[in-house]
Amino acid sequence: MYTSEASHSSAKGDIQTTNRILVVEDEELIKDMIALALEEEGYEAITVTDGRTALEYLTSSESNSGETAFDLLVLDLMLPQINGLDVCRLLRYQGNPIPILILSAKGSETDRVLGLEVGADDYLTKPFSMRELVARCRALLRRQRFTTAPEPVLEYKDITMYPRECRVLVRSEEVNLSPKEFRLLELFMSYTRRVWSREQLLDQVWGPDFVGDSKTVDVHIRWLREKLELDPSHPEYIVTIRGFGYRFG
Ligand code: CA
């Protein structure tokens, strides 16, 4: 259990331990502004600037004391080392139920949907006001103990994906996907029959900062097909649309 209150505490509000919030943001100015705003509200804010360190903080604090040292995670999406979506997915994969508020400069529906599907609880698009951020944090902290959000499931023909658990079943058999393969498939299954160019897939799955060429996409598509398709050389799930890119379904 990762509740923030000791089990013997019967007080509802008055006697409350200070909520500790981990802020993961690589832009120094924004990071400091968030920490300041949260501290002014009486929260304790701990800041880190990359995804890897965030995971270290969250996983080590868990194993040492049996309860997580943090009550909430404020997580930027575009981060060095490990990006926000992967941090989110890894935490959920490990069964960590910490409430997560994602911050992103990108505001498209796709990012929002992906963010929520990898197990984030809320989503805020930059630029945002500190008042709004604090209000969202307060709401998440308040409702954290009561929510058991339904598990979103993506299904298409013989493929079933459980994004929160990072699990995929193909013809009722569990298949192991790498994080990139997983995100590709998640994107495909979220928008069946949509045609994606290689550049769009690179942008969505690898991120706009990715340096490399679109051959990377082809390689991952080939690996995915080997794991999904009955006959990878005649794919029925991931179809090549000549001159355009790929389509799922
Ligand atoms: Ca960033």
Image (cartoon, helix red, strand yellow):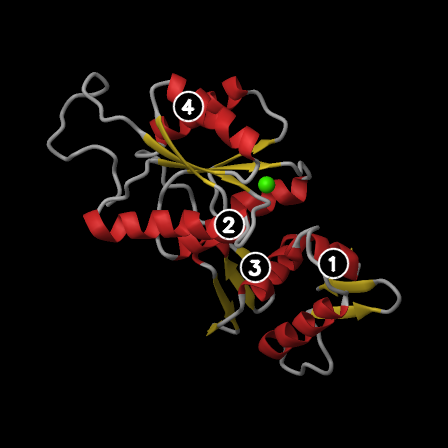
Horizontal side of residue 248 vs 183, given as left or right: right
Using the image, tell me which numbered label, if any, was put on residue 155.
3
Q: Which amino acid does label 1 sit on?
A: Arg
| Amino acid type indicated by mark 3 | Glu
- The CA distance from mark 2 to mark 4 is 25 Å
> In the rendered structure, are the residues bearing label 2 and label 4 in contact, judged by CB atoms less than 8 Å apart?
no
Where is 189 relative to 237, above or below?
Answer: above
Percent across and percent down for residue 243 are 89, 66
What is the three-letter code of the residue carrying label 4? Answer: Leu
Q: Which of marks 2 and 3 is nearer the N terminus?
A: 2
* Rendered image: mark on residue 38: 4
First in sequence, mark 4 or 1: give its number.
4
Q: Is mark 4 on a helix, strand or loop?
A: helix
Indicate the amino acid at tag 2: Val
Q: Check disc 4: other Cα within 10 Å, few if <14, some if 14-19, many if 20+.
A: many
Q: Distance between the residues labelled 4 and 3?
A: 40 Å
The disc placed on residue 118 is: 2
Label 1, on which residue?
Answer: 193
Q: Earlier in the sequence, mark 2 or mark 4?
A: 4
Q: SS of the residue at dot 2?
A: loop
Q: Earlier in the sequence, mark 4 or mark 3?
A: 4
Q: Mark 3 to mark 1: distance in Å?
A: 13 Å
Asked if 2 appears above or below 213 in the picture, the reply is above
Residue 236 screen position, x and y as percent: 70, 73
Tag in front: 4 or 1: 4
Are dots 2 and 1 in contact, CB under 8 Å? no
Question: Which element carries disc 1, helix, strand or loop?
Answer: loop
Left or right of residue 129: residue 134: left
| Mark 4 vs 3: CB contact within 8 A | no
Q: How far apart are labels 2 and 1 at the CA level?
A: 22 Å
